[in-house]
């Protein structure tokens, strides 16, 4: 049974279709990177999953419970940060945590303290939240999302406001949780941030999922990046429309057959080729190539 | 559910605004009690202002007879006021006011008219003996004099009504002698006795009269109540009319501090849902394992619990502050409510009275709370919820008054005509002629309609993206 199963989710606001047939699943131990530009529909999808917004059609089930029919059971084992870690500013970090914990059964003070240590807030936990920095609020938000020991963790752009060390801590924390079997949905507009620890990636654009693959699948793409040095850049560029000029090199993504045909074309047009270098694609570049050359941002 | 309610209550108490309003309330209560402490000094009707009397005299034309009378009267008054400064006891002051005016007036007027030496000597003698009696605080002498003159009057009267009237006055003077109630305005028993004397003639006349007009009936009812009250004061020796004490602040608790109850109501209900939206915390609340309607119900119930709580808090603070400023000993003085239908006084202990007054006005604050709660949920704007609730309160009062004045039936079922139950306490008829059962029914209908709409709306509402 999947931890989270989103099927053909559609959402309209007025006449505008915000989400079109969004489908994806999260299994035990998955870390799904949910990538999209601002306004692509990431937060709306997350809000639909959490029942904060109503869907027009489609279905969402969490741990086997449909969120429309069994909302209370479905949401019980979910932890989340949506948009930003909004907590009660007039309470201390500890009071916020205790209040959130009181909504669940059987959470002891030791559990709370353990989570505080986990996110590294033990020194400032008794301070009022209004005195926290954005990064500390983010840590507190993560603590709140973990308070009920969730098996589905949904983090909407959690890296906002975190310093590099915070991001590193978060990465280690999420990997540890995933190893224990927690399913994690983590959204970002920046793919490179998630590259190193996601095992699945979903790219959403204008409310549609354009790729929904595991990182492995993407990395085994046959395409490579090629850098070509020639004597006449301008002429070469006019012949190869897909290429970009970068640091006196033509840069393009292609497979081996395509590059062979290209070299032939350049030679036939009397362009001197000094150098051809093959490079591995970064995850982001791989995506762009799969998505058909669309830029994500 | 209980945890949800607890957390809502905690949120209210942890907010600085609650503390600030409570501190302001404390200052307000202190000031109110200080005003009550000196309430009588606000009453300027019995005080004579020497400079203004002198000012008036300087403009008078002594050639005219009318002006001369005023002039002498003012002069007498000035002299009496100056004389009173030399005497400390209330009895002496009272006697100066009441019995020295005539001798002094005659004496002064003799200076401005041609008068025989012997007459002046007699007037001076009369003035001096009166003053001597006053110096000795010999009020019994003046009362006995009064009785003698009343008895002479009685022996000359043949009319039945007049005889009854004079007898009643003689009874009052004898009562004073028997119970040793000195003539002294600072003595509340004396004041009660004087009040009876002041109204007695009018009261007896109205009672004897047949076919009273509406105004006369109202006046008679008022006089009856006044008589009963003053009799009660004399019989039970309770200083009912004194306003300078904690009891009277508490008796007026709803009038003095009602606005603060309203402020607390909007402070609790105004942000209760809207602030969660504006601060974004609603997202965390709604992903807790509760139905949306449970979450909203918990908020509503928390507010409902808090309203009586803040009222009791205000009451406790007022008793403490008022007690420190005005003393606690007035708390054993009862509150008397006049039931005009039965012509009896109903006695309540002060705390019971405050409690039933609060019970009678709480429906209004609850309804305003429900309106504020609904506005907070639907508009998701705290300022809109608070402002509209206040405006509604103002407009509702205007509409109530409109209905009273124009007797229009358009607003027959308007909420403000039904939310005030004070008439049940004052034992007066409902001003709009509804039974209290009707009013309760109407209020229940309002509650059900407003709350169901609010709950349905909240259940369907999307949490918008930032």
Image: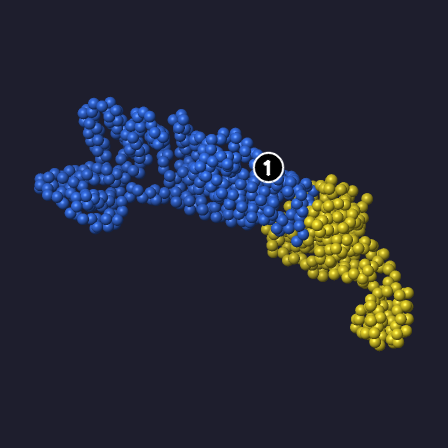
Chain colours: A yellow, B blue
- As drawn, B408 above or below A233: above
Residue A283, horizontal then vertical, whole percent: 81, 61
Residue at the left extreme?
B117
Q: Circle 1 sits on which residue?
A: B449
Q: Is residue A134 left or right of residue A283?
A: left
Residue positioned 84% across, 58% down in the render: A218
Residue positioned 82% across, 71% down in the render: A237
Q: Is residue B430 left or right of residue A141?
A: left
Residue positioned 36% across, 30% down in the render: B214
Residue positioned 68% across, 41% down in the render: B290
On-image quarter of the N terminus of chain A: top right
Within 10 Å of disc 1 (Cα), the crowding (few <14, some 14-19, many 20+) is few
On-image quarter of the C terminus of chain A: bottom right
- As drawn, B21 above or below A296: above
Residue B21, horizontal then vertical, whole percent: 51, 47
Front residue of A124 and B13: B13
Residue B405, horizontal then vertical, whole percent: 43, 37
- As drawn, B114 above or below A291: above
């Amino acid at each position: 049974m999947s931890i989270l199963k989103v099927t053909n989710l559609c959402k309209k606001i007025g006449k505008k279709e915000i989400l079109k047939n969004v489908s994806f699943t999260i299994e035990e131990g998955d870390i799904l990177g949910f990538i999209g530009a601002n306004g692509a529909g990431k937060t709306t999808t997350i809000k639909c999953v959490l029942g904060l917004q109503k869907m027009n059609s489609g279905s969402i089930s969490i741990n086997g419970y449909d969120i429309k029919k069994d909302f209370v059971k479905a949401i019980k084992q979910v932890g989340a940060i949506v948009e930003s870690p909004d907590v009660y500013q007039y309470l201390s970090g500890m009071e916020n945590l205790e209040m959130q914990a009181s909504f669940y059964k059987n959470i002891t003070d030791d559990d709370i303290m353990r989570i505080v240590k986990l996110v590294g807030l033990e020194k400032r936990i008794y301070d009022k939240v209004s005195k926290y920095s954005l990064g500390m609020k983010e840590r507190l938000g993560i603590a709140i999302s973990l308070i009920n020991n969730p098996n589905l963790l949904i983090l909407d752009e959690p890296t906002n406001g975190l310093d590099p060390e915070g991001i590193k801590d978060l990465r280690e924390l999420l990997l540890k949780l995933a190893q224990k079997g927690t399913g994690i949905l983590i959204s970002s507009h920046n793919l490179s941030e998630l590259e190193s620890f996601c095992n699945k990636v979903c790219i959403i654009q204008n409310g549609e999922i354009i790729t929904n693959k595991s990182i492995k699948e993407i990395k085994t793409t046959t395409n490579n990046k090629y850098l070509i040095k020639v004597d006449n850049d301008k002429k070469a560029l006019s012949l190869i429309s897909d290429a970009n000029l970068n640091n006196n090199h033509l840069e393009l993504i292609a497979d081996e057959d395509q590059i062979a045909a290209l070299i032939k074309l350049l030679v036939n047009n009397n362009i001197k080729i000094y150098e051809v270098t093959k490079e591995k694609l970064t995850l982001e570049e791989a995506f762009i190539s799969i998505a058909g050359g669309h830029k994500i941002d | 559910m209980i945890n949800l309610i607890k957390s809502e209550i905690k949120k209210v108490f942890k907010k600085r605004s609650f503390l600030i309003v409570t501190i302001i309330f404390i200052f307000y209560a202190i000031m109110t009690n200080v005003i009550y402490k000196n309430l009588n000094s606000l009453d300027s009707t019995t005080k004579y202002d020497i400079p203004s009397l002198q000012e008036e005299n300087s403009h008078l034309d002594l050639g005219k007879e009318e002006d001369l009378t005023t002039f002498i009267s003012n002069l007498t008054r000035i002299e009496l006021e100056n004389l009173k400064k030399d005497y400390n006891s209330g009895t002496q002051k009272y006697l100066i006011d009441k019995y020295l005016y005539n001798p002094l007036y005659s004496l002064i007027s003799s200076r401005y008219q041609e008068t025989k030496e012997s007459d002046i000597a007699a007037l001076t003698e009369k003035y001096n003996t009166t003053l001597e009696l006053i110096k000795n605080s010999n009020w019994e002498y003046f009362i006995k004099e009064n009785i003698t003159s009343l008895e002479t009057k009685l022996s000359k009267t043949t009319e039945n009504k007049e005889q009854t009237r004079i007898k009643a006055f003689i009874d009052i003077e004898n009562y004073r002698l028997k119970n040793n109630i000195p003539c002294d305005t600072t003595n509340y028993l004396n004041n009660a006795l004087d009040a009876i004397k002041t109204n007695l003639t009018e009261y007896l006349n109205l009672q004897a009269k047949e076919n009273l007009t509406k105004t006369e009936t109202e006046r008679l009812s008022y006089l009856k109540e006044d008589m009963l009250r003053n009799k009660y004061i004399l019989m039970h020796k309770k200083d009912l009319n004194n306003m300078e004490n904690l009891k009277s602040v508490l008796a007026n608790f709803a009038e003095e501090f009602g606005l603060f109850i309203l402020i607390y109501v909007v402070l609790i209900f105004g942000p209760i849902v809207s602030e969660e939206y504006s601060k974004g915390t609603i997202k965390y609340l709604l992903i807790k394992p509760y139905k949306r309607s449970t979450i909203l119900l918990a908020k509503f119930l928390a507010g409902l619990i808090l309203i009586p709580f803040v009222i009791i808090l205000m009451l406790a603070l007022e008793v403490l502050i008022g007690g420190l400023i005005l003393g606690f000993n007035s708390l054993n003085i009862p509150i008397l409510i006049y039931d005009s239908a039965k012509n009896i006084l109903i006695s309540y202990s002060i705390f019971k009275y405050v409690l039933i007054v609060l019970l009678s006005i709480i429906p209004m604050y609850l309804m305003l709370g429900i309106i504020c709660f609904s506005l907070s949920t639907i508009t998701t704007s705290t300022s809109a919820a608070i402002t509209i609730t206040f405006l509604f309160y103002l407009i509702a009062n205007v509409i109530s008054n409109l209905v009273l004045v124009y007797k229009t039936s358009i607003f027959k079922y308007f909420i403000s005509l039904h939310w005030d139950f004070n008439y049940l306490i004052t034992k007066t008829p409902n001003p709009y002629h509804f039974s209290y059962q009707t009013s309760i029914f109407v209020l229940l209908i309002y509650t059900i309609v407003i709350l169901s709409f609010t709950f349905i709306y909240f259940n369907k509402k999307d949490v918008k993206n930032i």
